[in-house]
Image: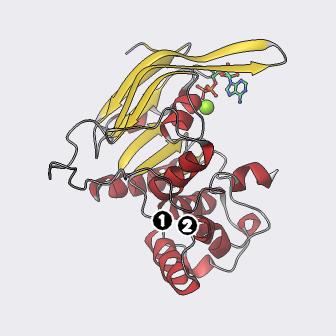
């Protein structure tokens, strides 16, 4: 069961052939001024047992660097698929994905994984911590795949756990923590590699109201420090914390 999860970071640790999503000067000496994320005419079709599902249909979607955007819509409308494509977990069936000015629509899987490892942090509704690893090891996992040396990994994990106020739980197993604590560890894991993009898929869906507020406050803090964030949520309370909302219905952005 955890194999798939480990694949989030697996593969492609070496050079990807992809420049960067960081705001570095381009060939003309000026950083890329366009959107960080630019989806044009994106469709995603899943084929299972001869049944085609159009999870996304002709989606056009742009996110500026440093934006905090909510993605809303009923169950099955394509929210998770949209995040998976933005986070390079899935490749689109049709259309173009331009990330920081680079076309990543047709990157080979290993290069997609390398970009994802460096630049994307995922937070899920079900926390998705790996049950047979300690809190420390869970947060360390993305850094292991980035190939960082042990001493640097230790320092970064300690800092990330400090940031979510879970430093004293480093040796515990996920099953010994409350849901709110597990999600804080998941936030630490998402940010430990200092990604530019945070994708949070219903991160408060399994939390009580107070725990949810803590996690959203953490996202706001990350946003304040420069991260670009996509937040899938059903909770109307968070409409005020984001800068913009988009609404998906049946695989299409309707508002
Ligand atoms: P949401 O997150 O809004 O609930 P999803 O993006 O998960 O929606 O799913 C959109 C549609 O695509 C649904 O009909 C879902 O069943 C289908 N779908 C999503 N992922 C897969 C997959 N890996 N294989 C087959 N169908 C999928
Ligand atoms: Mg979903």
Outermost residue on the bottom side: it is 151
Q: Of 127 and 90, which appears nearest the observer?
A: 90
Q: Quadrant of ligand 1?
A: top right
- 90 relative to 145, above or below: above
Outermost residue on the left side: it is 29
Q: Position of residue 195 (x, y in %)?
A: 43, 57
Q: Is residue 51 visible?
A: yes
Q: Position of residue 249 (x, y in %)?
A: 51, 14
Residue at disc 1, secondary structure: loop
- Mark 1: give few (<14), some (14-19) or many (20+) Cα within 10 Å: many
Q: Residue at x 26, y 53 (%)?
A: 23
Quadrant location of residue 205? Answer: top right
Q: Determine whether, in the image, residue 38 is placed left or right of residue 252.
A: left
- Mark 2: give few (<14), some (14-19) or many (20+) Cα within 10 Å: some
Quadrant location of residue 70? Answer: top left
Q: Determine whether, in the image, residue 103 is placed left or right of residue 173.
A: left
Q: Pointer 2: what residue? A: 146
Q: Is residue 208 visible?
A: no
Q: Nearer the viewer, mark 1 or mark 2?
A: 2
Mark 1 touches mark 2? (CB < 8 Å): yes
The numbered mark at residue 116 is none
Q: Position of residue 220 (x, y in %)?
A: 35, 52
Q: Residue at x 30, y 41 (%)?
A: 67
Q: Pointer 1: what residue? A: 193
Going from N to C along the chain, the mark reached first, 1 or 2, is 2
Q: Residue at x 48, y 37 (%)?
A: 86
Count of numbered circles on the image: 2
Q: Of 68 and 179, which appears nearest the observer?
A: 68
């Amino acid at each position: 069961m955890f194999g798939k999860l480990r694949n989030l970071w697996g593969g492609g640790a070496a050079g990807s052939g992809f420049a960067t999503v960081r705001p570095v000067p381009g060939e003309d000496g000026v950083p890329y001024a366009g959107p960080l994320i630019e989806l044009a005419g994106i469709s995603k079709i899943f084929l299972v047992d001869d049944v085609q599902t159009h999870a996304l249909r002709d989606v056009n979607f742009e996110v500026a660097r440093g934006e905090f955007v909510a993605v809303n819509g009923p169950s099955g409308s394509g929210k998770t698929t949209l995040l998976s494509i933005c986070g390079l977990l899935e490749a689109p069936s049709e259309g173009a994905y331009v990330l920081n000015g680079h076309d990543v629509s047709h990157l080979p899987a290993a290069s997609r994984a390398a970009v994802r490892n460096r630049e994307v942090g995922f937070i899920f509704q079900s926390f998705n911590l790996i049950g047979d690893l300690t809190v420390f090891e869970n947060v360390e996992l993305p850094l292991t795949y980035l190939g960082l040396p042990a001493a640097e990994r230790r320092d970064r994990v300690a800092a990330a756990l400090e940031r979510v106020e879970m430093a004293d739980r480093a040796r515990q197993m996920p099953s010994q923590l409350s849901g709110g604590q597990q999600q804080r560890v998941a936030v630490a894991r998402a940010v430990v590699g200092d990604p530019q993009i945070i994708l949070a898929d219903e991160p408060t869906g399994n939390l009580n109201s107070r725990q949810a507020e803590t996690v959203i406050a953490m996202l706001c803090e990350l946003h304040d420090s420069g991260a670009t964030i996509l937040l899938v949520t059903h909770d109307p309370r968070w409409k005020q914390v984001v800068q913009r909302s988009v609404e998906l219905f049946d695989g299409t952005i309707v508002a």
